[in-house]
Structures are given as structure tokens and as C-alpha cells.
Image (cartoon, rainbow, N blue to C red):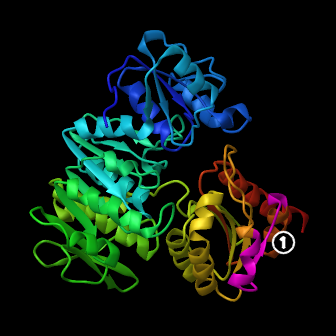
């Protein structure tokens, strides 16, 4: 699929989305005029994001078609969530303007870059993308990095939504998505694949998408600890395959436990401590993926391991919103069984109890993964942990609602319940939490979950003042 990458003007419909915002800023950095609209902005949500975009020279319009004018050869860019009846698209058709999907534009930029590096997988791809970009940056290169999440190391007061780093070097490191099938558009020189599990699509479809993705790559960097990934890698022939593992010495890059931490095997067989600010075994695995990828790109393994000590993390990946009198509040993007389970297992050794609100990221995904989600919670929650499920994200359109979230708690156990109101959750969690506990806000596709985490911190502070 081709897309116009050198048009003088673009209009991004749903410009505030996690995938749309960085691409809009990248096109702006490349010199194009960029305007956009977003349903959330029209509903009074995302004021900070809207102000940030305006400050970066992006014109913001209501999502009523008024910003789609065709001036300067304007091209309409849309996400997969934008339906044909949205006024911006209606107006573009009336004017005969070219329309291009976000993934088509990004993949065209990516495929045209000298060294395109793609990071894929059901879980961990935002973190691996950020880690890989950080290693390249920290070792003196200037990669372009495009992520679906804010990278904390590049976040500054005047750049709070740092999900893109326009670079001058040949490397273009991008998170690529299987949820809408757009991974099929990318032709990477280096393809990273972390894992495969059910999220937006059934397993049979995922195996085809990821298998074809690896088949188009020049070099494949794969997770030796994922049977599903290695089954796909076994079908490859005639190309380099680099692997990483937390357990198997047969992997190209492997780590082993060393006391309370980990150490990485270097090329000469010696081991070097891996120092990380982020915690959890899944983040050790993510770091190995980035180290292996950096090595393919010419970074000495020891230098990559050393660079990881400076990596600060990715926003909404077990990000601490605050700690009040021994209670820590986390803001986390976990939204499928693998992601949520990894986060809970990482947090449990650090906290007496985990009190979680989980908002599913859509009715469709919940229908697809509901059974696995219930089973994961049933085997992962400790007796004293608590879980509150709430209604899924609903952005309107043609979505078909269901009651899976309401019906799930009995399948999980006495630790789980359903709650209608966020205010009720704040009151319940703030009243229940004590020293050593963690309160976790989990979910995707909803920026207001971060606001909820901050509200919880304030509620804990207020509880102390009135005690």
C-alpha cells in the first residue's frame, strides 16, 4: 500500500489518538502543514493534549468537516476508528480529497527509511520500542522513534506527549500493530517479535499476520521464551534469526539471575549486571529484546546493557502516580490477559495487597478474550487482592454492547466485583488501602484513566487530612 508522504498539507481525523498524535507531529517536523480534529476534544476531554498540539503548530478544528478544505493539496489521514459517516470524511469525499489510513502513511515513511526497525507482539512492543530507541540515542545515534506511548526519557515540561522523536539518523524504530491488520504494510530491515496471544484477533489469524511479518524482514529478532513465536521462527529460512531468553543458554542474547537481579551474557561468554529502573521479569525480557536489536544495528552488547541503566520507562506502564502514607497508586496500560498478568506478578512481591480497577478497552475485545481474562485473574489474584471491573470503553459508532464485565466476577472469585461508578471505586479503594498496599488503575484507549489515578492520590491525601 502506498501513501503520499510528501504532500504539503495533512488533516488528521482523530488527531489525539495514541497512534495518530506522533504521526501528526512527525509530519509537522518534516515541514508539512498539519491540522486535525478529535471527538474527545469536542466532548471537552484532553485539554492538555489539545493545547500541546496547538503549541506544536497543529491546527485544531471541531470534528464537523470545517477543517477539511482541500487547501494546499490537503490529504485526509484517518485512524481505523473513524467511520465513513464522520463529517470530516464526508467533507473530504465531497471535495474529492485523497484519504489515507494512518498505518498506510506511517508504513510508507517507514519503508522508505534507510534502516526500518519494527517492533511487534501482543504485549511489550511499546516498551521495547522505547528501550531500543533509548539505546540508540544513548550511544550517540539519532534515530527516529515513533511509539504508541509516551517515552519518559524524552518527556519534558514543554513536550509532555513525547511519543515521537524525529531523528536525523538512518534508523526508524516504530511500534507496529496487529490489531487492525496493518502490520501487513511494513517491510522491516529488522523485525522484532515479542509474543503472540489473543487480544483483538483469534490466534489463527495472528499466526498468519506475524508469520508474514517475519517473512518480509531482513533480520528477525525473536523471543526464545515464547513457543508461539519460535514456532513461526522455525519456518524461516535463508535469513538471520537472533533470539533472546531469560532461561535458555541456546539463545543469542540471554540473561540469568544474579542475587536479586539479573546479568546478561556478553559476546565473550562473560556476564554483565543488567541495571533497570523498571521492574518485573517481563521488563527484563523487554530489555533483552532491545539489547539484541541494538546489536543487530551495530551497538556492542556491553554498551547496550550499560545504556539500559538510564532507561526510565514508558508512560502508563506501571507508572507511579504517587505514594501516600505507604499506599502507592499506579497507572497501567494493561488490557489483555498477558499484559495484566505480567503487571500483577511484578507488583505482588512489592506490595501486601493489590487493589485494581480494570476498564476493558472495548466490547469487542472483551468478547474475544473474556474467558482467558477470567481464567488469568482467577489464578493470579491472591486471597487478599481486590479487583473491580467496570464497563468497557465505548466511543460510540456501531459497537454492540454486552454484559461480560458484569457477569465475570463470579468466574474469578470472591476478590472480584463489578462497579458502575469511578467515584465509588475511589471511595472504596481509598478507604480500604493501608500501608504496603498498591492501588492500580488499568486499561487502554482512555486518557482519563490517568486522571483517575491522580484523583486516587488526592483522595488518599484527603483521607489523611481528615483522619
Q: Position of residue 181 (x, y in %)?
A: 41, 51
Task: Judge from the rendering whether residue 215 lies leftward or rightward of residue 454; answer left or right.
Answer: left
Q: Is residue 115 visible?
A: yes
Asked if the magenta segment contains residue 384, the reply would be no
- Comparing 252 with 372, the one in front is 372
Residue 311 x, y percent position in the rendering: 39, 57
Residue at 59% across / 37% down in the picture?
83
Image spot of residue 272 (x, y percent): 23, 74
User: Which quadrant is the C terminus positioned in?
Assistant: bottom right
Identified at 75% across, 66% down, the residue is 403
Residue 232 position by quadrant: bottom left
The total of numbered circles placed on residues is 1
Res 141 → quadrant: top left
Q: Is residue 363 above or below residue 19?
A: below
Instruction: Report the front residue among 302 and 419.
Output: 419
Closest to the observer, 188 or 307? 188
Residue denoted by label 1: 431
For mark 1, give the secondary structure. helix
The crowd level at tag 1 (other Cα within 10 Å; few <14, some 14-19, many 20+) is: few
Query: Over which residues does the magenta segment extend?
Result: 406-423
Amino acid at each position: 500500500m502506498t501513501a503520499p508522504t510528501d504532500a504539503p498539507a495533512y488533516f488528521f481525523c482523530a488527531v489525539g489518538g495514541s497512534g495518530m498524535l506522533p504521526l501528526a507531529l512527525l509530519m509537522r517536523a518534516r515541514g508539512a502543514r498539519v491540522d486535525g480534529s478529535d471527538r474527545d476534544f469536542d466532548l471537552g476531554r484532553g485539554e492538555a493534549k489539545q493545547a500541546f498540539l496547538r503549541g506544536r503548530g497543529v491546527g485544531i478544528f471541531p470534528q464537523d468537516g470545517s477543517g477539511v478544505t482541500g487547501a494546499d493539496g490537503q490529504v485526509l489521514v484517518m485512524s481505523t476508528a473513524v467511520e465513513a459517516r464522520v463529517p470530516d470524511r464526508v467533507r473530504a469525499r465531497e471535495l474529492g480529497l485523497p484519504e489515507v489510513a494512518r498505518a498506510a502513511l506511517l508504513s510508507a515513511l517507514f519503508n522508505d527509511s534507510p534502516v526500518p526497525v519494527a517492533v511487534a507482539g501482543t504485549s511489550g512492543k511499546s516498551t521495547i520500542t522505547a528501550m531500543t530507541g533509548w539505546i540508540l540515542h544513548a550511544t550517540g545515534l539519532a534515530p527516529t522513534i515513533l511509539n504508541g506511548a509516551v517515552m519518559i526519557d524524552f518527556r519534558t515540561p514543554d513536550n509532555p506527549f513525547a511519543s515521537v522523536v524525529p531523528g536525523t539518523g538512518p534508523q526508524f524504530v516504530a511500534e507496529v500493530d496487529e490489531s487492525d491488520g496493518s502490520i501487513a504494510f511494513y517491510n522491516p530491515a529488522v523485525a522484532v517479535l515479542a509474543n503472540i496471544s489473543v487480544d483483538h484477533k483469534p490466534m489463527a489469524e495472528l499466526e498468519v499476520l506475524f508469520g508474514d511479518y517475519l517473512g518480509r524482514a531482513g533480520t528477525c529478532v525473536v523471543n526464545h521464551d515464547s513457543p508461539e513465536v519460535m514456532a513461526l521462527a522455525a519456518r524461516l529460512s535463508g535469513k538471520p534469526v537472533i533470539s533472546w531468553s531469560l532461561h535458555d543458554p541456546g539463545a543469542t542474547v540471554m540473561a540469568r539471575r544474579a542475587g536479586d537481579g539479573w546479568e546478561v551474557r556478553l559476546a565473550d561468554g562473560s556476564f554483565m549486571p543488567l541495571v533497570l529502573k523498571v521492574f518485573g521479569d517481563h521488563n527484563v525480557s523487554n530489555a533483552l529484546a532491545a539489547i539484541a536489536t541494538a546489536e543487530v544495528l551495530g551497538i556492542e552488547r556491553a554498551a547496550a546493557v550499560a545504556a539500559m541503566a538510564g532507561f526510565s520507562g514508558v508512560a502508563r506502564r506501571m507508572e507511579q502516580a504517587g505514594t501516600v502514607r505507604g499506599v502507592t497508586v499506579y497507572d497501567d496500560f494493561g488490557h489483555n490477559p498477558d499484559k495484566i498478568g505480567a503487571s500483577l506478578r511484578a507488583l505482588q512481591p512489592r506490595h501486601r495487597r493489590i487493589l485494581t480497577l480494570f476498564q476493558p478497552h472495548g466490547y469487542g475485545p472483551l468478547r474475544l478474550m473474556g474467558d482467558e481474562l477470567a481464567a488469568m485473574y482467577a489464578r493470579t489474584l491472591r486471597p487478599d487482592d481486590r479487583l473491580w471491573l467496570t464497563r468497557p470503553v465505548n466511543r460510540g459508532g456501531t459497537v454492540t454492547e454486552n454484559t461480560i464485565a458484569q457477569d465475570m466476577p463470579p468466574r474469578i472469585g470472591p476478590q472480584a466485583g463489578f462497579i458502575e461508578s469511578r467515584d465509588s471505586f475511589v471511595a472504596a479503594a481509598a478507604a480500604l488501602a493501608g500501608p504496603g498496599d498498591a492501588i492500580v488503575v488499568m486499561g487502554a484507549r482512555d486518557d482519563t484513566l490517568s486522571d483517575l489515578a491522580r484523583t486516587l492520590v488526592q483522595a488518599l491525601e484527603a483521607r489523611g487530612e481528615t483522619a
